[in-house]
């Protein structure tokens, strides 16, 4: 336990210089409030929360890390994303693969600069094709390993200007 706390604290200190917060494989079940305090003056642009045991992404996280350009949440237990994520207007890359999503998280459609969305290996069975088309900045969408119907996969592959992996 003390070792885990020290690891998180050290990585927060590293983020002060690099503006990149790597909390991957820290066994986090929730985001410690100390992270927000330690990094309150730092415009973190990259955050990796890969391979933890998070069930939710806190609303507070979205409002405190609005400068993020890359966010990796893969390998957790997430089933949804908070609506407050729309505050993350600088986000360009989002990885939510290997979680427990059963629906395409519609909040990501509202991220104006999102170029790459990695949503592979979830349980998504249907996607609103029109929502994906509305994502003007999207270049790449990775949906491999989701139980999408063949027809949906075919429609997704035909979206102009977006490389879709299904």
Image (spheres, rainbow, N blue to C red):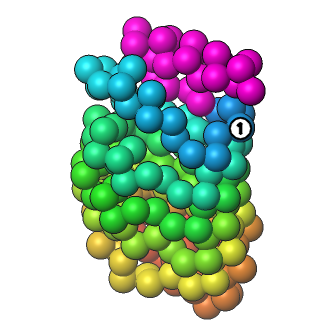
Q: In the image, is residue 13 part of the stretch drawn in magenta?
A: yes
For the N terminus, the image quarter is top right
* Label 1 sits on residue: 27
Which class describes the residues within 10 Å of circle 1: few (<14), some (14-19), or many (20+)? some
Magenta residues, as a range? 1-23
Q: Going by the image, does 141 lie left or right of 59? A: right
> How far from the left and from the top, in percent, is residue 151?
61, 90
Against 23, residue 6 (above or below) is above
Residue drawn at x 49%, y 19% as measured from the top left: 12
> How far from the left and from the top, in percent, is residue 65?
33, 38
Secondary structure mainly formed by the magenta segment:
helix
> How far from the left and from the top, in percent, is residue 83?
33, 65
Against 66, residue 53 (above or below) is below
Location of residue 84 by image quarter:
bottom left
Q: Going by the image, does 84 lie left or right of 157? A: left
For the C terminus, the image quarter is bottom right
Residue drawn at x 45%, y 28% as measured from the top left: 35
Residue drawn at x 30%, y 39% as measured from the top left: 64
């Amino acid at each position: 336990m003390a070792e885990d706390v020290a690891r998180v604290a050290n990585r927060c200190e590293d983020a002060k210089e690099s503006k990149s917060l790597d909390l991957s494989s820290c066994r986090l079940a929730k985001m410690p409030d100390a992270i927000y305090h330690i990094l309150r003056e730092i415009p973190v642009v990259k955050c990796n929360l890969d391979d933890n045991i998070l069930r939710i992404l806190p609303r507070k996280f979205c409002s405190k890390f609005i400068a993020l350009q890359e966010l990796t949440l893969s390998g957790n237990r997430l089933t949804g994303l908070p609506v407050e994520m729309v505050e993350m207007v600088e986000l360009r890359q989002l990885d939510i693969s290997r979680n427990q999503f059963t629906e395409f998280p519609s909040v990501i459609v509202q991220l104006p600069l999102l170029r790459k969305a990695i949503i592979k290996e979830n349980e998504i069975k249907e996607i609103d094709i029109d929502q994906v088309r509305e994502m003007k900045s999207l270049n790449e969408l990775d949906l491999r390993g989701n139980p999408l119907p063949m027809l949906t996969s075919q429609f997704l592959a035909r979206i102009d200007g977006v490389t879709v992996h299904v």
